[in-house]
Image: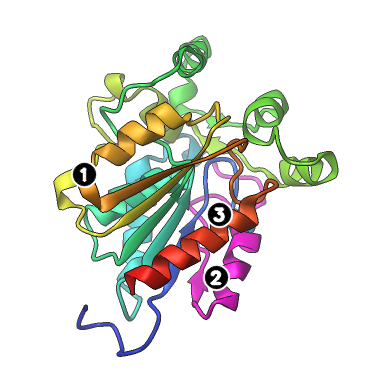
Amino acid sequence: MSARKKPGAKPPVVMIHGAFTGPWSLEEFAAKFRSAGYVVHLPALRHHGEGKPPPSLGTTSLTDYAGDLEEFIETLEAPPILVGHSMGGLLAQMLAARCDVRALILLAPSAPWGVAPSTLMEIAAAQAMLLNVGFWNSVLKPDQYVAGSHSLDRVPQPKHDAIFKRMVPESGRATFEILHWGLDMRRASEVNAREVTCPLLVFCGSDDRVNPPGTVERAAALYRDLATFEKCAGMSHWLVAEPGWENIAARALKWLDQDQ
C-alpha cells in the first residue's frame, strides 16, 4: 500500500478522454464509479475545451498531454486508478510507466510505439492520412464519416448526433505519433513496459475498427501477466457509452474490488 493512501479509502480515479472529445465523453462512465464510492477526476487534455482551439493545438504532442496529466496526478493524495479511452488509453499507459499508479483500466486503447497493426484497415487508414500533406502540424477537424462509420457506429442515432456535435478538433502531431509511430523519430508514444508495475484490465470491442482486438491484445501482451485482456462481443469503439457500456463499467468495478 502506498504511503499516500489513507487506510480504508478508495484510491482516486482519473479518467482520460480520447481524441476529438473532452471530459464529457466519460460522464456516464464516471457516474457509475462515483456511485460505487470513488472520487473521479475528469481532466481535459490541453486545448480540448469546446471553444475554438489555438493553432498551437496542431503541434501539441502526446508527450505534452502526458506531461500535463502527470502534473495533475502529482496533486492527488494517493496513487490513482487511471481509466483511459482510445488515445486516453495510450496516455494512461505512458503515465503508468512514469508515475505511481494503482491500476489501469483501458477502454479500446490506442497502442504504444512498436505495436504493429493487425488489420489492413488500420494500415489503409494511416496511409490515407499521408495524402493530407502537412496534417502532422495541423489542427484536425472531426470527420463525420469517420466518426459515424468507425467510432460511433453502434451508438443509436439521436445520441450519435449529440456526441458528434460536441466533438472538438484534435492535434495533427498527436495523431501522427499514434498512426505513424514508425516515422516518429522522437518515439513520443513509446512506453517502457518494464516500468509498468500495476495491474491492467484491457477492454476491446470485437467489432472495433479503430483499435481492433488483434492490435489491442498485442499491446496488452507487453505487460505480461499484469494485464487481463477482455474482448467485448458485438461492441465497437465507443465503449464508454454505446449499448453494453454499463456491463463494462460493472466488470471494471468488480475487478477493482478484487484488487483492493
| Residue under pointer 3 | 248
N-term-proximal mark, 3 vs 1: 1
Say what amino acid the circle numbered 3 marks. Answer: Ile
Q: Is residue 33 left or right of residue 159?
A: left
Q: CA distance from mark 2 to mark 1?
A: 27 Å
Disc 2 marks a residue whose amino acid type is Phe
Q: Earlier in the sequence, mark 2 or mark 1?
A: 2
Identify the residue at horizontal 33%, vertical 54% (top origin): 200
- Tell me the magenta residue range: 26-55
Residue 181 vs 199, above or below: the answer is: above
Q: Position of residue 58 (x, y in %)?
A: 48, 34
Q: In the rendered image, which residue does mark 2 sit on?
A: 33
On the image, which quarter does residue 67 sit in?
A: bottom left
Local crowd at mark 2 within 10 Å, few (<14), some, or many (≥20)?
some
Q: Is residue 43 magenta?
A: yes
Q: Quadrant of the C terminus?
A: bottom left
Residue 166, x across and y down, in percent? 72, 47
Q: Which of these two is toward me, 41 or 159?
A: 159
Does label 2 or label 3 sit earlier along the sequence?
2
Q: Which residue is mark 1?
A: 224
Q: Residue furthest left?
A: 194
**Is residue 240 depicted above or below 213 in this figure?**
below
Left or right of 176, for residue 21: right
Mark 2: secondary structure: helix
Q: Quick one: 13 or 236, which is closer to the camera?
A: 236
Q: How is the image coloured?
A: rainbow
Frontmost residue, 252 versus 97: 252
Q: Residues within 10 Å of mark 3 (few under 14, many from 20)?
A: some
Image spot of residue 207 (x, y percent): 58, 29
Q: Quadrant of the N terminus?
A: bottom left
Callout 1 crowding tier (Cα within 10 Å): few <14, some 14–19, many ≥20: few
Q: Is residue 222 left or right of residue 207?
A: left
